[in-house]
Image (cartoon, rainbow, N blue to C red):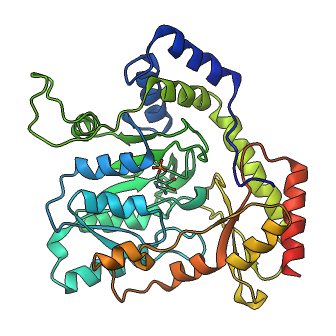
Amino acid sequence: MIPVNEPLIGEREEDYVRECLRSGWISSSGRFIEDFEEKWAGYCGRKFGIAVSSGTAALQVALGCIGLEPGDRVILPTFTIISCALAVIYNGGVPVLADCDPRTWCLSPEGVKDAIQREVQKGHGKELKAVMPVHIYGHPVDMDSLLELADAYSLTVIEDAAEAHGAEYLTGRSGSNPSWKRCGGLGDLGVFSFYANKAITTGEGGMVVTDDAMFAEKARSLRNLCFRPEQRFLHTEAGHNFRMTNIQAAIGLAQLERIEAILEKKRAIGKAYKERLRDLPGMQLPAEEAWARSIYWMFGIVLEEITGMNAAQLAERLRDQGIDTRPFFLGMHEQPVFQSMGLFRNETYPVAERLSRQGLYLPSGLTLTESQIDEVAEAVKNALC
Ligand SMILES: Cc1ncc(COP(=O)(O)O)c(C=O)c1O
């Protein structure tokens, strides 16, 4: 079976982990934590990095930084992982959903506009506090118009760049001074996951990045049970144990040292699939907009309805040929857990619904070989004929 993903662990990772084990720095103190935080933040063009135990924890901490009051609203794409909506709920807020762009599959500025209007009409305009663009499958969200909207409605921007390590976005393209910036470096707070299938992994892990010293201090406190610096075991706020270990950071740092090679391989996989599948009718391949440098974290495809097939049917045919795939996200508004909480009832988001039905991603891991890419592309062609 060709797996969807396999992590690639190098000698440097082993050396650094051995150093942790030999030195005894195996919990959440040690040289690798601070080094990884500083270098990751720097890589993203940010001042501060706060390492945590997962991307889900990073989302929760980032939302915690902005201090939501009960009933405050946060806009997010329906087409994303459940961690995004849960982070809002666990922080006492109300998730407000928006549809995504049919080309990039990311949160669309029009969707955000609709969501804002809806909330304003319902009398919740004042409770709108934040927006959470999620860079899907390695392609950046179109941030410029979103940042303008955020500015107009005083929304904090929390970027979820879990799937877009090192992806770049051309900011200010309609002005005279456009510049490329890395995802996670565009909003007020950026969030990353380092789960084993991510471009850079620490096994499990995550990071919050920001330029704001107050957010950084709050994030550090929230990840460590809100211990007060002046008196141990006195707590005036509720926090979490979301600490990353020195061992995880050691792996992350080793990976970060060769991020350019990792991303080059990801992009090469994307290019290779595109060359092989481009002429196949009935299929949408991932876009790369002129203002974006995607990392092709996972190579997604969306089947046109004229194929008479949906993603689950294609996945089954590919599995029969020894190829593993993953379905696209199921929208938050279609999740039974949220329906049972009385959320998103009767809401519909046609773009996301179609992507969930017709989309899947192909093997895209760093260990994938050219001949495996050929095999996967052949299998897709056969499955569709
Ligand atoms: C977009 C996005 N955000 C957040 C997460 C959560 O990260 P983690 O699995 O590290 O908790 C993921 C998951 O992999 C993700 O894809």
Tell me: residue 16, above or below residue 367.
Answer: above
Which of the two residues, 366 or 54, is positioned nearer the viewer here?
54
Q: Quadrant of the N terminus?
A: bottom right
Which of the two residues, 306 or 116, is positioned nearer the viewer here?
306
In this picture, residue 20 sits left or right of residue 338: right
Which of the two residues, 228 or 140, is positioned nearer the viewer here?
228
Residue 147 appears anywhere in the view? no
Give percent across and percent down for residue 21.
Answer: 52, 14
Q: Quadrant of residue 211?
A: top left
- Residue at (13%, 27%) from the top-left corner? 233
In this picture, residue 26 sits left or right of residue 286: left
- Residue at (44%, 54%) from the top-left corner? 160
Q: Quadrant of the C terminus?
A: bottom right
Give percent across and percent down for residue 247.
Answer: 50, 24
Q: How many marks?
A: 0
Give percent across and percent down for residue 55.
Answer: 44, 47
Tell me: residue 185, above or below residue 362.
Answer: above
- Residue at (64%, 21%) from the top-left corner? 14
Residue 268 appears anywhere in the view? yes
Which of the two residues, 254 or 139, is positioned nearer the viewer here?
254
Give percent across and percent down for residue 289.
Answer: 62, 65
